[in-house]
Image (cartoon, rainbow, N blue to C red):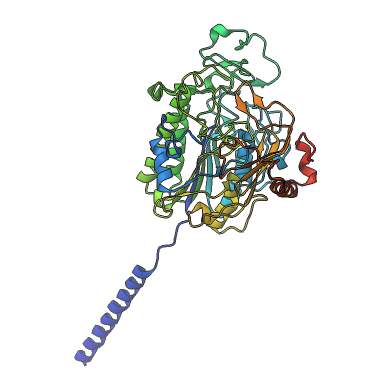
Amino acid sequence: MKKKRFHNILLILIVGVLFSACQQNEKKNEKEPTKSPNIIFIYMDDLGYGDVSAYGAKNLHTPNIDKLANGGVRFTDGHATSATCTPSRYGLLTGVYPWRNKDAKILPGTAPLLIGTDQFTVPKMLKEKGYHTGIVGKWHLGLGTGNTNWNKKVTPGPNEVGFDYSYILAATQDRVPTVYIEDGYVVGLDPNDPIEVDYENNFEGEPTGKNNPELVTMKWHHGHNNSIVNGVPRIGFMKGGEAAKWSDVDMADHFLAKAKQYVIDHKEEPFFLYYAMQQPHVPRTPHPRFVGKTGLGPRGDVIAEADWCIGEFINTLDKEGLLENTLIVFTSDNGPVLNDGYYDDAVEKIGNHTPNGGLRGGKYSLFEAGTRVPFITYWKGKIEPQVSDALICQVDLLSSIASLVGSEKKGQDSEALLDVFMGENKQGRDELIIEATTRTALRKGKWLMIPPYNGSAKNKLVNIELGNSTAYQLYNLNDDIAQQNNLADKNPEKLAEMLSAFKTIRGKENMGTQKLELK
């Protein structure tokens, strides 16, 4: 009897051990749930197609940007939606062409929020899929409702269009207010020294660059002669807020620290970070450790500074074990400009460097250098290093990222080109509307058609061809990347085809922004 009982107990123990072993084996065979990929946009400001050594720059070296370019997809025909900053940022975040919004133009620091709080955006789409969303850097899409009190919470702003966290400068580095804003509140503001901002009239007793040149450390060339902050004359007038004013030479380091901290704080959850860098926009104020680094003056030095920041940021992602699960998109808001308002040796020290990379035009221009910019996608272990000639645009990122995270949402003008961004397909867009200061043109395949526009052919202040002409312009970019041969008269069939496609996309109701009658 005892022997039988012993056998029963032994049998129970054996069964229990086997059952436990099976459970452990099943757990080992179970796959860990796949974490949604992190997504990062690194957005430069006025960086030209030829400002990156991976894109052919010989006199300016960008080793950290090159690592992204050489380790991912380097696009040779990637575009911003506009040749100026505010419209490009609008298209990037909304998936909508900026010419559809009559207010999508370069905004003053006091402009109301440009993106509607009910409008769909990249961060809103990602929040729906469980992402934490953040922006660090330049905003320039308006804040508030047009009558902003900078001494209270500034709203609506980035937090109201999808960002869980925001640490921004309101407009640009050359515009007031010259303060950082975190989740709607001015950082470091002394309530006993309130901020006042006005873009029309100066405040009594406040010095300006125009009237007090002896107080400036950076001489203004055009348009930058209002309030002086840190020796730099700005656009717009500002009074008060002394304790909150930023240090220009520390701005790159400041934003870098915030971007790094953001990914560290949110590494345990899927996140989207829009890291909007201020370089090489004016005023170019490199930290002392970068001054003279390139021999190209402050413009070259701040590009070198930005490249270093990107390297430090990528190192943080690597250290935190995030690179293998992070899609990085690197690009710029528009093409290059040298003299954009200050005497800073950008022209005098340019040497043999060509910021537009052999393209025609630059910032403000409908020629290719206005919107064709460095455009890189990088995902360690997921994207094979390659060069792609596919025609793509920043407006396509919303629908493409939606495909990546399993969202069915699309942007109005955003094409779902995830396979192109991932380097799995080299067939991009067929047609693209590009824009420059409310003027628009059409890219179709390798052809570019610019309708007639009144106005100067060149902006003499910045020395850039704008693309204006009394005649139609038609260029075959396969044979003429520098756009020297206008084929409109020699190829009327192609011109008619382009014009028909242009009218179809633009629509008669949207032609009011164009100062011409199409012939």
Residue 325 versus residue 85 in the image, above or below:
below
Q: Position of residue 456 (x, y in %)?
A: 70, 25
Can residue 162 be seen in the rendering of this structure? Answer: no
The residue lying furthest to the left in this view is: 3
Residue at 59% across, 22% down = 191
The residue lying furthest to the front in this view is: 490
The residue lying furthest to the bottom in this view is: 1
Task: Decide if residue 292 is on the left or right side of residue 151.
Answer: left
Residue at 66% across, 41% down = 487
Can residue 443 be seen in the rendering of this structure? Answer: yes
- The quarter of the rendered structure image containing the N terminus is bottom left
Closer to us: 2 or 457: 457
Residue 54 sits in quarter: top left
Residue at 29% across, 82% down = 15
Residue 467 sits in quarter: top right
Q: Position of residue 469 (x, y in %)?
A: 71, 32
Task: Decide if residue 106 is on the left or right side of residue 241.
Answer: right
Residue 381 sits in quarter: bottom left
Circle count: 0
Residue 465 versus residue 27 in the image, above or below:
above
- The quarter of the rendered structure image containing the C terminus is top right
Task: Decide if residue 186 is on the left or right side of residue 25.
Answer: right
